[in-house]
Image: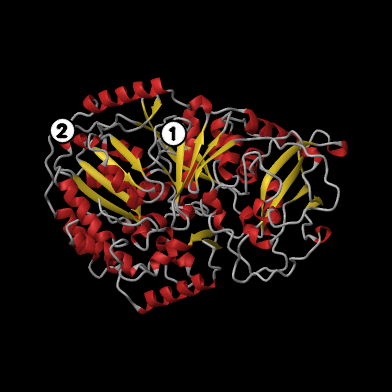
């Protein structure tokens, strides 16, 4: 077994989750079902109070605070996944094709062969044992021991379809998991008990089962560390950032700008270290996480405010800026795009085939597997988009890009826009069988880039570089991650090499006092759970373990690199600016690699909830902007089409 460390555990398992209905003490009956049921006539076992993992404060229907007394990874994971309204949004609606074939099945008829026993009541074996969220722990267990038996068994529980295989949505979830020391022939091992929470629309009440899977003694060590090792505030923030980034593709999650430990929602009783915003169904909601040890007192807040005021007054050093008004690079890129991706019978065939694939998917399924990779529905939708600049005013990015350029021009700050091609565009031949590997399939996406260039916006076109990078793929290592929406190291390096070359061509580059050779690059590896795995059908999830990826890490002296407020370059955007940079191994993403290549400091501003939202944050950084010569706006190109985060004005 690998040597345990909190950072490795966090890296391996800060993802995924499940839901229930609840208070933090985890009631044993779904309230929405309980309210409509008659009192049971059978004998009820003696009540034992459930172990409380967190306290929940509901501020209103859209906001709540979850307080964890001790910041263990187990407690924070459970606080995040248990009955989280962001995760539960829309799940109470009955699927259109649900018929209730086994709605009247008795307990002894429940189709769960992976369970050794099934009961209506919480078993005595788990009395006094704290429950955990199963998905993040199962991933940690696999990362540490290589044993995926627990994950497979629990996925099987959630995949049971009650003789209705065409219903995509889960009929039930494992809401709580307990690891209990084994007895008898299992002495020295861990036995697993699960609370199974049926979906509201099934009309069933929760039930409990003992899994047939038993884990060896090394699992006990992992479980003990997971449940007892406490995080400091920096580790807890990393946990929150990673969780937000993992849920972002389909739950539209982001961390709000909030001083850790400060008052939230105008109540001194609420002092969370992180506030997560989610918008999975078109209506925003907030879940905040609080740890007593991380709270700031009123005195500390006043001191922090004074310190911030002093820093704002003197930390950022203004620079005299002159825009590079040369249009050579822009016009050269514009010329290269003319007729570079025409609509042809081949592109029409691709679009029609992809539309058929999408039409066959259940409406709620956001990812699917094919040809050794996982694909994302929203990325595919972007490839079959209509005219992007023809969208309504809240979804058309072009006027907002022009508006942003004018805003930065007024401060003599350069703007460089970088649309990151989606994996499905670079690997179109793997997405749709029979597609030539060199066929440019994204006709309307490429046309929109041409329109931005024609409107006077400087755009870095990564498509040729990424297509060249994929030609050097060595399976199973690709330029994009197999099970994720983001690029892997080869693709990122190709993009950053092109970007660094562009930055060094600006007329002001020498005036920015570059310091080439001032940073050090070291090889590393990253264990990364693909962000698409959670969106597969339940029965398929266990097939896709976390990927071990090659990575880089940039150091300044003996410390990991992080750009400061005086950086002449601001790299802003969505998760493409944050992956490998502020999560995973850290200091190895686009910002750090660009700083290493150019010798210029790079400040990074990431909106995990989507690229359109980062512009509002930029406008609040007026003091920081005094040092900036260049703003690089990098984000996935899919958010140019029907973005769930609207393109509203600055």
Q: Position of residue 254 (x, y in %)?
A: 43, 45
Q: Outermost residue, bottom direction? A: 345
Q: Position of residue 570 (x, y in %)?
A: 27, 40
- Can you see residue 497? no
Q: Quadrant of residue 13?
A: top right
Task: Tell me where residue 426 sits by quadrant.
Answer: bottom left
From what the image shows, is residue 39 above or below residue 432? Answer: above
Picture coordinates of residue 415 (x, y %)?
A: 21, 48
* Viewport quadrant of the N terminus: top right
Whether residue 61 can be seen here: yes
Closer-to-camera residue (220/460) = 220
Instruction: Name above or below for residue 58 compared with residue 116.
Output: above
Q: CA distance from mark 2 to mark 1?
A: 40 Å
Of tags 2 and 1, the one toward the viewer is 1
The answer to whether 241 appears left or right of 562 in the picture is: right
Q: How packed is label 1: few (under 14 Cα within 10 Å), some, or many (20 or more)? A: few
In terms of sequence position, does the residue under pointer 2 or pointer 1 come before the other? 1
Q: Which residue is mark 1?
A: 267
The residue positioned 32% from the left and 75% from the top of the image is: 343
Mark 2 closeness class: few <14, some 14–19, many ≥20 residues within 10 Å: some
Dot label at residue 319: 2
Secondary structure of the residue carrying numbered label 1: loop
Residue 589 x, y percent position in the rendering: 39, 41
Where disc 2 sits, the SS reads loop
User: Which quadrant of the structure image shows residue 521?
Assistant: top left
Tell me if residue 415 comes above or below residue 337 in the rendering.
above
- Which numbered dot is residue 165? none
- Left/right placement of residue 116 relative to residue 331 reads right
75 and 114: which one is in front?
75
Q: Which one is nearer the viewer's eye here, 89 or 227?
A: 89
């Amino acid at each position: 077994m690998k040597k345990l460390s909190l950072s490795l555990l966090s890296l391996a398992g800060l993802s995924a989750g499940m839901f229930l209905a609840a208070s933090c003490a985890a009631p044993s009956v779904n309230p929405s079902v309980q309210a409509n049921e008659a009192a049971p006539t059978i004998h009820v076992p003696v009540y034992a109070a459930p172990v409380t993992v967190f306290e929940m404060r509901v501020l209103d229907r859209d906001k709540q605070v979850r307080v964890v007394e001790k910041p263990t990874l187990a407690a924070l994971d459970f606080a995040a996944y248990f009955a989280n309204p962001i995760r539960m949004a829309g799940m109470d609606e009955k699927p259109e094709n649900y018929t209730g074939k086994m709605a009247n099945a008795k307990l002894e008829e429940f189709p769960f062969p992976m369970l050794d026993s099934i009961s209506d009541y919480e078993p005595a074996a788990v009395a006094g044992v704290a429950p955990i969220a199963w998905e993040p722990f199962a991933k940690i267990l696999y990362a540490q021991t290589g044993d995926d038996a627990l994950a497979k068994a629990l996925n099987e529980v959630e995949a049971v379809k009650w003789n209705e295989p065409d219903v995509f949505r889960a009929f039930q979830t494992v809401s709580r998991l307990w690891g209990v020391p084994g007895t008898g022939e299992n002495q020295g091992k861990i036995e697993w008990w699960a609370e199974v929470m049926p979906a509201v629309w099934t009309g069933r009440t929760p039930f409990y089962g003992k899994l047939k899977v038993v884990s060896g003694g090394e699992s006990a060590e992992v479980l003990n560390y997971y449940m007892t090792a406490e995080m400091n505030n920096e580790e807890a923030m990393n946990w929150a950032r990673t969780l937000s980034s993992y849920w972002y593709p389909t739950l539209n999650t982001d961390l709000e700008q909030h001083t850790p430990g400060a008052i939230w929602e105008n109540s001194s009783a609420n002092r969370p270290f992180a506030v997560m915003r989610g918008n999975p169904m078109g209506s925003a909601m907030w879940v905040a996480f609080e740890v007593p040890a991380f709270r700031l007192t009123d005195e500390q807040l006043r001191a922090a405010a004074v310190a911030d005021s002093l820093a704002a007054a003197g930390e950022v050093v203004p620079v005299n800026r002159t825009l590079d008004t040369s249009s050579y690079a822009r016009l050269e890129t514009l010329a290269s795009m003319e007729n570079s991706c025409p609509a042809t019978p081949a592109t029409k065939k691709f679009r029609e085939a992809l539309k058929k694939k999408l039409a066959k998917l259940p409406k709620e399924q956001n990812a699917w597997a094919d040809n050794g990779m996982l694909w994302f529905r929203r990325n595919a939708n972007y490839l079959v988009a209509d005219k992007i600049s023809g969208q309504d005013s809240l979804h058309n990015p072009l006027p907002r890009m022009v508006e942003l350029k004018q805003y930065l021009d007024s401060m003599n700050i350069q703007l460089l826009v970088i649309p990151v091609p989606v994996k499905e565009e670079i690997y179109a031949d793997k997405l749709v069988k029979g597609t030539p590997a060199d066929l440019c399939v994204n006709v309307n996406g490429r046309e929109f880039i041409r329109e931005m260039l024609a409107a006077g916006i400087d755009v870095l076109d990564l498509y040729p570089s990424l297509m060249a990078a994929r030609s050097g793929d060595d399976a199973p290592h690709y330029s994009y991650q197999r099970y994720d929406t983001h690029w892997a190291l080869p693709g990122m390096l190709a993009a950053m090499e092109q970007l660094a070359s562009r930055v060094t061509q600006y007329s002001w580059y020498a005036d920015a006092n570059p310091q080439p050779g001032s940073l050090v690059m070291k090889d590393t590896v990253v264990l990364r759970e693909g962000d698409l795995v959670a969106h597969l059908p339940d029965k398929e999830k266990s097939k896709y373990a976390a990927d071990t990826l090659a990575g880089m890490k940039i150091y300044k002296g003996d410390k990991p690199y992080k750009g400061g407020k005086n950086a002449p370059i601001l790299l802003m955007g969505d998760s493409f600016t944050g992956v490998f940079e502020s999560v995973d191994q850290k200091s190895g993403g686009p910002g750090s690699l660009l700083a290493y290549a150019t010798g210029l400091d790079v400040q990074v501003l990431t909106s995990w909830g989507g690229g359109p939202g980062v512009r509002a944050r930029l406008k609040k950084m007026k003091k920081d902007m005094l040092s900036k010569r260049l703003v690089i706006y990098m984000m996935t190109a899919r958010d140019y089409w029907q973005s769930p985060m609207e393109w509203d004005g600055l």
